[in-house]
Image (cartoon, grey):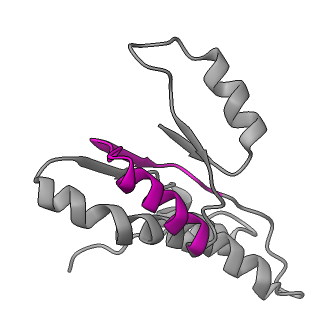
Amino acid sequence: MLIARREKLLKELVATLALAEAPHLYFSCNVAEAASVEKVCRKILSDNLLPDVLIFNAGVGGMFDVENIDVDRFEHIFRVNFFSVIYFLRHLLPPIMERNSGMIAAVGSLAGTRGMPRSAPYASSKALSKPQ
């Protein structure tokens, strides 16, 4: 099952994938919007399509200009890179835990621990805290 924002590209990707026993499922969803994620999750759950593995790979970046801080851009980057995972987990984690099986992976970035010039929004959205 594939989830992404642009349905046309999803269709093109699915067409390139080898068919298994069943065709690949895909859903168009703006992961930066909680309501869009909720709609897709409701469909997944109502159709009994809960996956065994969730891989969160969505990510956006952009250059940071310290002299002209674009708060809207910061918020968008955080919604895609960080909160989208939370939006999905809010709906899919409880049934995974109830089922008592499944794997979850979120793709990070070295930028989250090392940073990069002019990438404050991206790097901070990918940062992980270390246990003390």
Left or right? Give the position of 61 relative to 4. right
Query: Total marks drawn?
Result: 0
* Span colored in magenta: 35-59
- Residue at 60%, 62% (x, y): give it: 31
Q: Is residue 15 above or below residue 46?
A: above
In the displayed structure, 73 sits above or below 48; it is below
| Residue that extends furthest to the front in the rendered view of this protein | 46
Q: Quadrant of residue 124?
A: bottom right
Report x, y in % for residue 106.
Answer: 41, 54
Q: Which of 124/98 is in front?
A: 98
What residue appears at the point 23 percent right and 60 percent down from the top-left corner? 95
In the picture shown, does residue 129 fall above or below 23?
below
Q: Residue 62, percent across and down?
A: 78, 63
Query: Relative to the observer, which residue lies in front, 52 or 43?
Result: 43
Q: Position of residue 70 (x, y in %)?
A: 82, 84
**Residue 59 picture location, percent across and down:** 62, 56
Q: Quadrant of residue 37?
A: bottom right
Image quadrant holding the C terminus, namely bottom left
For image coordinates 81% across by 66% down, the residue present is 63
Q: Is residue 93 left or right of residue 25?
A: left
Q: Is residue 80 magenta?
A: no
Q: Report the side of 98 relative to 26 (left or right).
A: left
Q: 87 or 120, which is in the foreground?
A: 87
At a point 50% along the width and 55% down the height, the residue shown is 110
**Residue furthest to the right:** 68
